[in-house]
Image (cartoon, rainbow, N blue to C red):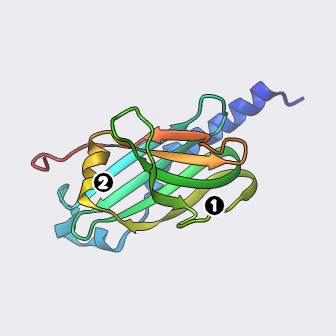
Amino acid sequence: IINMKNLFIYFSAIALLILGACDSLTPELDYQEEPALKSAKKVLNFRAHLSGENSMATGEAIFQLNTADMKLSYKLIVANLENVTMAHIHLAPKPGQSGPPVVWLYPSSPPPTLIEGTTNGILSEGMVEISQELVEAMYAGRTYVNVHTSAYPGGEINGWIEGNMPKGMN
């Protein structure tokens, strides 16, 4: 007999396997092959671990920024998420506060698009151009990923974006 606890353990184990493989899931970008761009000052990495207070869903957002052209590649991976409608990067006025969406991750632009049923795996991936101000906000702890669903229109899972600032970048 499958009960909720066993189901939760099963999906948690799957989520951990997915998240553990995230390094291999990082988008392969054309500019990675150029040695000059492998410098920490040219390619910056960010992550957000996603969870929710009243949800068994989890997720991971992986970002890589090419500072030469300010293109941010992303991969958004989720587990146990029901009826997804949209996902964004939000910009908060101060760390720990709520803020408006500034980058659409799913779909790539409005309007929201319902994915019926359970989503497990890659929800979205792509590349967007961002501003230096947004990069600074990411390092300042003022940005977060929020994934919205039919049951939680304000966001079911979210997580603050974190990155290690390379020496000499401030």
Residue under the image location 50 percent in, 43 percent down: 20
Circle nearer the N terminus (1, 2): 1
Q: Is residue 35 left or right of residue 100?
A: left
- The tally of labels here is 2
Q: Amino acid at mark 2?
A: Leu
Q: Amino acid at mark 1?
A: Pro
Q: Which residue is mark 1?
A: 112
Viewer-closest of 114 and 13:
114
Q: Is residue 142 left or right of residue 150?
A: left
Instruction: Please provide percent x and percent y for residue 87.
Output: 55, 53
Viewer-closest of 54 and 39:
54
Instruction: Please provide percent x and percent y for residue 153.
Output: 65, 45
Instruction: Please provide percent x and percent y for residue 17.
Output: 57, 42
| Placement of 152 over or under 114, stated as above or below | above
Instruction: Please provide percent x and percent y for residue 94.
Output: 33, 36
Local crowd size for mark 2, using a 10 Å CA cut-off: few (<14), some (14–19), many (≥20): some
SS of the residue under disc 1: loop
Residue under the image location 67 percent in, 50 percent down: 120
**Furthest residue in direction left, as rendered:** 168
Label of residue 15 in the image: none
Residue under the image location 76 percent in, 33 percent down: 7
| Placement of 98 over or under 106, stated as above or below | above
Mark 1 to mark 2 CA distance (whole Å): 23 Å
SS of the residue under disc 2: helix
Viewer-closest of 57 and 34:
57
| Placement of 160 over or under 66, stated as above or below | above
Q: Which residue is mark 2?
A: 134
Viewer-closest of 131 and 13:
131
**Furthest residue in direction top, as rendered:** 5
Q: Where is residue 132, by image quadrant?
A: bottom left
Question: Badges 1 and 2: C-beta atoms under 8 Å apart?
Answer: no
Residue under the image location 69 percent in, 30 percent down: 9
